[in-house]
Image (cartoon, rainbow, N blue to C red):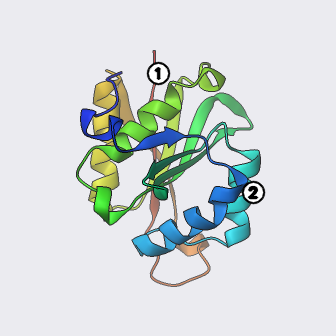
Amino acid sequence: MGGINLLLTKSVELRKPTLEDGSNIWRLIRKTQVLDLNSAYYYLILSKYFKNTCIVAEHQGEIVGFVSAFLLPEKQNTLFIWQVAVDESQRGKGLASSLLQELLSREELSNVKYLETTISPSNKASQALFKKLAENFETEMKKIESISPEVFPNENHEPEQTYQIGPIH
């Protein structure tokens, strides 16, 4: 598992979120205009109760990156990655990959052997990010299931394909 991108080490701090970060995380997600925006309360709850499985990137006092994740209740060795957000000012610098690698290096997550996430077919950037992560961990990535568009309440939603990476050593 490679180290944090050298471009990031001097200017971006990767850390656990705090309750006070919740509203800024919500603003970051809204600003991306591509991720599903949940309520501000959702990001406050993640920051307070799921801080061990989430991570923020802070640059000059501003939240510029965020990963939300949780351990699957029925598979405690599997971390589900819900959202990965990077501010436009930080894209192309390896921040998303660094956030995921730093998150997985935490002692609290030392039992994690698999990552799961869902990605829509048109989201090539996320597919590439997770493919690279699997390569960095020298393990496989496979699609294991899909969430059908019919189960979403709004029309025109793509299917969400579930990707699994692992085992992670």
Q: Position of residue 64 (x, y in %)?
A: 43, 57
Asked if 137 appears above or below 43 in the picture, the reply is above
Looking at the image, tell me whether mark 1 or mark 2 is earlier in sequence order.
2
Residue 79 is tagged as: none
Q: Which quadrant would the C terminus be assigned to in this image?
A: top left
Residue found 32% across the figure and 40% down from its top: 8
Q: Nearer the viewer, residue 16 or 97?
A: 16
Identify residue type, mark 1: Pro
For this view, does 5 lie left or right of residue 119?
left
Question: What is the secondary structure assignment of the residue under circle 2?
Answer: helix
For this view, does 58 lie left or right of residue 68?
left
- Foreground mark, 1 or 2? 2
Q: Which quadrant would the N terminus be assigned to in this image?
A: top left
Residue found 46% across the figure and 21% down from its top: 168
In the rendered image, which residue does mark 1 sit on? 167
In the rendered image, which residue does mark 2 sit on? 45
Q: Dot 1 surroundings within 10 Å: few (below 14), some, or many (20 or more)?
A: some
Identify residue type, mark 2: Ile
Q: Nearer the viewer, residue 18 or 98?
A: 18
The CA distance from mark 1 to mark 2 is 29 Å
Q: Position of residue 33 (x, y in %)?
A: 42, 75
The quadrant in which residue 32 appears is: bottom left
